Amino acid sequence: MVAASPTITPLGSRAVTALSSSNRELDLNRGGLPPHATPKYESTLRTIPISSSGLTIGNRISELTSSNDFRRFISGHPLQDLIGRPLDQLISTDEISQRIIGISKDGSIQDPAIDFEIGLSDKGAMPASTSAASSYSRFGWTRDMANKARALIDIGMHDEAKKVITCLAKTYNKPEFRDQIASYLWHPDFYPDQPRERYASGDGGHPPIRFAIDQSGELTRSNQGWAHNQIDAVGAWLHVTFYLANKIADKDPNFLRDLDTELKSQNVDKPQYNTDSILSVTFKALNKIHCWNNYDAGAWEDYSQLKRASSVGIVLAATREAKKFFNTNGYHQISIFNHDDFIGSLNNLDARCEQTLEERIPKNGEFAVECDSFPSDAALAFLLYPYNPGLTDEQEKAILKTIYQNRMGTVGISRRDHDEYVGSGYNTNVHSSGIYANKFTGDYKPAEWTLFDPILSTHFLNKVEKRLSERGEIDQESLELSEFHLRRSLAHITKEKSAYMKRHYSGADNGHMEYIKITVDKKKLPEAFFFDYHYLPDAESEPGRWLPNENSPLLWTEANNLIMLNKQQEVKALLEKYYSDIWQIAPNRAA
């Protein structure tokens, strides 16, 4: 029997309103910059070679935007005119506000292009999806919740973000989970390698990453077996906690102190917990397990690998975010047992994680590598945004080279090599449990995910904003690359209602495989698209079509799009404010 789903309070309309009213008061003159700048087109990104044959990022973009498969994919889309027009004809702030977000000129919400369904429970838990057809609706992942909290922060919904962050902290502070984390600190002086080896082997289990959400809306242990050794997810939780603390330090300087007080009241019968915050305990545990040289399953929760660049990089970003906070505000905001040990742990994490990251993401222009078995993993994109730990320009280019050469697909971005999860034909594969495809067929296509294009669009917009602030120049190349990924992100919004049959495990006591009907409504942002070879549109067209999988909407993707649309409005409003002829880059701007 399937447990009842928790009550989730939708935040979609409030998020849309927040997008329309986010602070746009950006000021370029703070550095004494010139009152006007002209577009600068320097071929430093488009000309990055991604193959020995001379193929460049620019070639790859031109190939993708002009492909018949992509044109078929966007045909009939409500935003087809925006998605399909030349990249140098920018989508304006008015078009973003009115056509995409759905804010009319009088400020009311009217027919948004996306039905945002992001939401949270009374306890602060956030499911991965709201689709009744998806098991994701009953579970919350630490990683997903951290990323969704980041989106809430960036669009100004700080109270809701606090609720999510508090939920995660209180969950890990429960004795059953806290003791698992703290156990890596027990007796390491006598057995210095024991914490690392125990984490690698899984002896004693790992702190959970995937939680069930009970009917009260609280995160609880999931009874289903899972690969919980996910260092990246722990880093994401720590990062968003200190990111918020730094973000609101002027307006709410006591955020972490108040959180610490709430955590102390949680375990009144265990006063020993109150000498060391779960935040400091977790950082010290990451140091003791040598997270920079350990095995973890990473973002995709499948194959345990040594020295995953994305995991190590996210921990490094979290460490530096925490150090930034403590260096500015001191170490008195949270309970810390043995300050010298804690500071030493942060400094060691910083140095060791950076060393591993330089091994995986070189500074000499070579391709970035996630890990030995899966070198070209799209999880590397997370280190461009939102978990950039301070990469050099060359390291960022190394990641872009890997993604553009190996992961860029027709409509989205595939996760890694040999990825069978929800790949082509997964819905009818008789040899799987209902989520895996047969990757050994000659015409196999991996699923193409929606997470990454909004991340890349935001990354390139950050480069535009940085160039404006530092040099008073418009980086037209980064602007167009951001526009490319904005268009692909918009194309992911389902243009019509889709329905198909899928093999599904019944889950009963004597469970068996059966066919169920999957329906995905329009205006949703799915987890991924899979290729359906059985579809025959007409006698003159190529067979097949890209369909959204049942995890639609994926609320992590919604979060990434909220961040992207917010940044699009910020940067383009800045351009419109200071450079009246910016739309010469976009001569066909909508009136």
Image (cartoon, grey):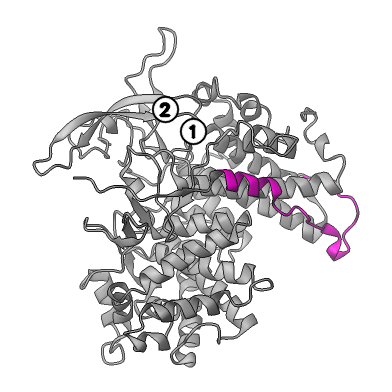
Which residues lie in the magenta part? Answer: 13-40
Would residue 447 be visible to someone looking at this image? Answer: yes
Say what amino acid the circle numbered 2 marks: Trp
Whether label 1 touches label 2, CB < 8 Å:
yes
Secondary structure under tag 2 reads: strand
Q: Is residue 465 left or right of residue 199?
A: right
Q: Which mark is first along the chain, 2 or 1?
A: 1
Q: Which mark is residue 411?
A: 1
Looking at the rendering, which quadrant does residue 26 occupy? bottom right
Q: Which mark is residue 546?
A: 2
| Mark number, residue 441 | none
Residue 119 at what x, y percent from top left?
A: 47, 50
**Which quadrant is the C terminus positioned in?**
top right
Crowdedness of circle 2 by 10 Å Cα count: few (<14), some, many (20+)? many
Which residue is at a point 68% across and 71% down the rendered structure image?
251
Residue 175: x and y, percent? Answer: 30, 76
Residue sitting nearer the eye, 168 or 490 = 168
Q: Residue at x 10, y 44 (%)?
A: 509
